[in-house]
Image: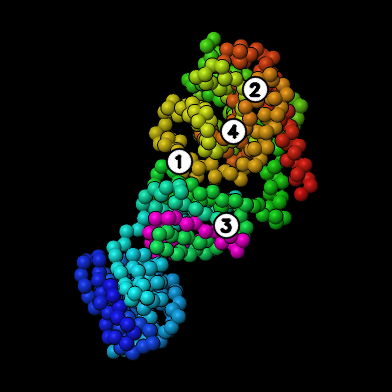
Amino acid sequence: MLFQSAGQASIRVLNRINQTEDELRTLPNGPGTYVSAKDISRMMGMRDPFLNTERNKMVLYIMDHRLKISGKTSFIIIDEIVYHLPTSVKIEDDDLFLPAEPFFLILRRTIMPRIIYDARKELLDIDKVEFNITGLTIDEKANGTILRVHTREKFPEKNISSFVHDNGWFYLTITGGVVDSSEIIRSETRGVVRHVTVDQLNESVQLAFNLRSQIEGHEVYQGNNPSEIVITLRTPLSKSAERIKDVRDRWRLDTVVLDAGHGGKDGGTVGRKGTKEKDITLDIAKRVALMLEKNTKIRVVLTRDEDIFVPLEKRTQIANEANGKIFVSIHVNANPNRRVRGFESYLLRPGKTDDAIAVASRENAVIKLEDRPGNKFKGLTGESLIMATMAQSMFLKESEDLAAFIQSELDERLSSPNRGVKQAGFYVLIGASMPNVLIETGFLSNSVEEKNMKKPEYRQKIAQGIYSAILMFKESREKVLAEG
């Protein structure tokens, strides 16, 4: 579409949407180029405009959007959002004329990203709009805010970048993005997000989020499902007196939930000599419970105290209903390589290594035994998994501390290798509203470790390590609270 120079009565328009040429009237007298609102409506509008000649107001219906224009003012309204022009709208012959360059820039950044006006070349190009970024949802959580940018395609990881500026804004840039800006802008803000702006550039889109307060960190994730990009903004706990009291009460470690992995029809892994994971885990859990009940005032809740099958979802439900302060799930490992030995602790996060993913996949396979339709864990991968993990990430630091204590205490008592603290998407940990850790106490696939696991004294060493780690964790947390 070609504009004439200021002073000419019309400009030539090439409309790539319907492959037609047209003329767009301009004011004959400068300075600058002003374009006819009526002609814009005729070319781009989905229906006839509403015109109030007495009040010099006009409403254009462009695509699915309402654009309100008033004569002798420098403001226009798009979908109830106000935008400011550098000069006022002019009135002539029952028509309104808008300053061309700033007006088309606003259209580009809001509802028509494929409209380009080059003032130097006096060229306006209207092309078909095909949005691949269609909306935004903001959810507030106890430990931060989750942003979901809705998309129509999966963007390569290298095309998504983000950073937090010290000016109080969080920026997300998506190369190759074409955004329905009006849908983003009118998204309801909540949580740490005060305000959202959008900038449609030639090769990318930048979403800017004005933050109400500082954040401790953020993560950006896009899984296999191309329907959204997930951003988590983590906020620190409030330091108000009421919040501090609530945190202190929460951290009084008065209830521990011990989860003996597997059970009943789910035997877990089985060693070459027939040793079953479900029997080892129940024995260790009972030993830890006995020491805690005998030597402390801590209440102990077992998700199972006999050889029964307990669905994964039920285990964290038991923990939450008991108001547990920590959740420890006890397991025994397996590996195709029978030489692999050692103990390791896991946090609930998407796995980063092939070994961690394989361990989680084996433990998660129990859902195949759950005869319940609509199991919430089925298909829980990619962005769905990271959403589940972030919902309880306020406990991540404490879970890391607990896991570190467990590894340290087991390391002092066992000759088996210390394989460290890792992360993987264990379903059994999802939903636990407290610090949570899954322990793989050894490998039944290894003949030496299976032989050890069959010995009561070895299982007692494992139990003592877990018991001691819980006490150390309790002491460390309550010391922090006392100082706070």
Q: Position of residue 122 (x, y in %)?
A: 33, 76
Of residues 426 and 105, the one nearer the viewer is 105
**Residue type for callout 3:** Val
Label number found at residue 161: none
- Crowdedness near tag 2: few (<14), some (14–19) or many (≥20) residues, C-alpha within 10 Å: some
**Residue type for callout 1:** Gly
Q: Earlier in the sequence, mark 3 or mark 1?
A: 3
Q: Secondary structure at mark 3?
A: strand
Q: Disc 4 versus disc 2: distance between alpha carbons?
A: 14 Å
In percent of the image, x 53 and y 30: which residue is there?
Answer: 356
In percent of the image, x 54 and y 9: which residue is there?
Answer: 273
Q: Earlier in the sequence, mark 3 or mark 4?
A: 3
Q: Earlier in the sequence, mark 1 or mark 2?
A: 1
Location of mark 2 (residue): 417
Q: Disc 3 versus disc 2: distance between alpha carbons?
A: 41 Å
Residue 214 seen: yes
Q: Earlier in the sequence, mark 4 or mark 2?
A: 2
Residue 183 inside the magenta-drawn segment: yes
Q: Position of residue 433 (x, y in %)?
A: 59, 41
**Magenta stretch in the rendered image:** 164-191
Of residues 254 and 26, the one nearer the viewer is 26
Location of mark 4 (residue): 422
Query: Residues at badges 1 and 4 in contact (C-beta under 8 Å)?
Result: no
Location of mark 3 (residue): 164
Location of mark 1 (residue): 382
